[in-house]
Image: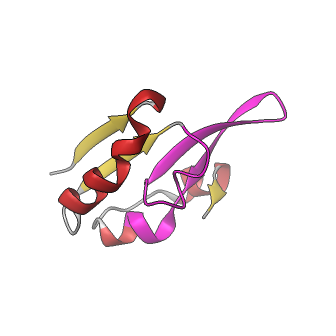
Amino acid sequence: SCHVVYIGKAKSRDLDDVVASTAGKSVLTITDGNGLAEKGSCINFKVVNGRLKFELNQGTVASSNLKVSGQLSSMAILI
């Protein structure tokens, strides 16, 4: 099974605690703040040139024992 945790901009300062408490567990973390994919979020939404894009942190996804389809990966900004 997999759990999903969404951390909005207002709570982005809590990402470090969430990442630490979910380490090694099958938890997909989703955020929407600058630089949060680099800090350990699996998927981070951001606006690039006026368009909504998403970053995919491959290392975090792998360490969470999750798999991402090739189609989803091809649409992402890979971290």
In the shown orientation, is residue 67 left or right of residue 78? left
In the shown orientation, is residue 63 left or right of residue 48? left
Q: Is residue 72 above or below residue 48?
A: below
Q: Position of residue 9 (x, y in %)?
A: 48, 31
Q: Give the quarter of the image for residue 45.
A: top right
The answer to if 50 sits in the magenta stretch is yes
In the shown orientation, is residue 15 left or right of residue 71? left
Residue lying at 55% horizontally and 50% vertically, measured from the top left: 72
**Residue lying at the far left of the rendered structure:** 1
Residue lying at 37% horizontally and 36% vertically, measured from the top left: 7
Q: Position of residue 46 (x, y in %)?
A: 64, 38
Residue nearest the observer in this picture, 35 or 45: 35
In the shown orientation, is residue 53 left or right of residue 48? left
Q: How many marks?
A: 0
Q: Position of residue 1 (x, y in %)?
A: 15, 51
**Residue lying at the far right of the rendered structure:** 49
Image colouring: secondary structure
Q: Which residues are magenta?
A: 33-61
Residue lying at 60% horizontally and 64% vertically, measured from the top left: 79
Residue lying at 43% horizontally and 54% vertically, measured from the top left: 42
The answer to if 40 sits in the magenta stretch is yes
**Residue lying at the far front of the rendered structure:** 13
Q: Position of residue 66 (x, y in %)?
A: 32, 62
